[in-house]
Image (spheres, rainbow, N blue to C red):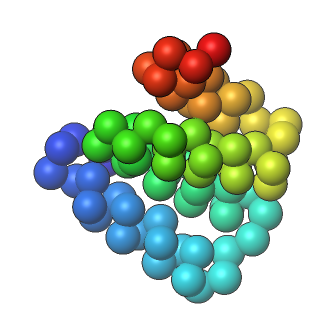
Amino acid sequence: MFYLRYYDDALKDAVKGIDMGVEGKLLASAYKIIGQVCRMKEDLTKAAEYFSKAIELDPENGDYYHFRGLTYKLMDDY
């Protein structure tokens, strides 16, 4: 899904899910996808924000902390 040519498709699908009103863990997953796309496009501040939103919605999911931590490392903010 995250090959370079699929970034925009992944982003569109995540936003579509949000627009459809997904909640809870599905919404957290959509934010994670957006965060991953932002990170791959080197918009690290925005990526960290989306991972934080995912954590707020699903604080038991360690993947979100992992992705945010990787992003902070790339930002030299750890």
Taking 42 as reference, is 6 left or right? left
Q: Position of residue 31 (x, y in %)?
A: 58, 56
Residue sitting farthest toward the left: 5
Residue sitting farthest toward the right: 60
Tell me: residue 15, above or below residue 40.
Answer: below
Taking 3 as reference, is 16 left or right? right
Going 67% across and 63% down the picture, which residue do you hit? 27
Taking 78 as reference, is 5 left or right? left
Tell me: residue 59, above or below residue 26.
Answer: above
Going 69% across and 50% down the picture, which residue do you hit? 54
Quarter of the image with the C terminus in it: top right
Taking 19 as reference, is 61 left or right? right
| Residue 63 seen | no
Q: Position of residue 13 (x, y in %)?
A: 41, 69
Q: Position of residue 74 (x, y in %)?
A: 44, 20
Task: Give the quarter of the image for residue 41.
Answer: top left
Tell me: residue 48, above or below residue 68.
Answer: below
Going 36% across and 70% down the picture, which residue do you hit? 12
Count of numbered badges drawn on the protein: 0
Residue sitting farthest toward the bottom: 20
Task: Give the quarter of the image for residue 23.
Answer: bottom right
Q: Position of residue 8 (x, y in %)?
A: 26, 61
Going 69% across and 44% down the picture, which residue do you hit? 52
Task: Give the quarter of the image for residue 51.
Answer: top right
| Residue 39 seen | yes
Tell me: residue 49, above or below residue 39.
Answer: below
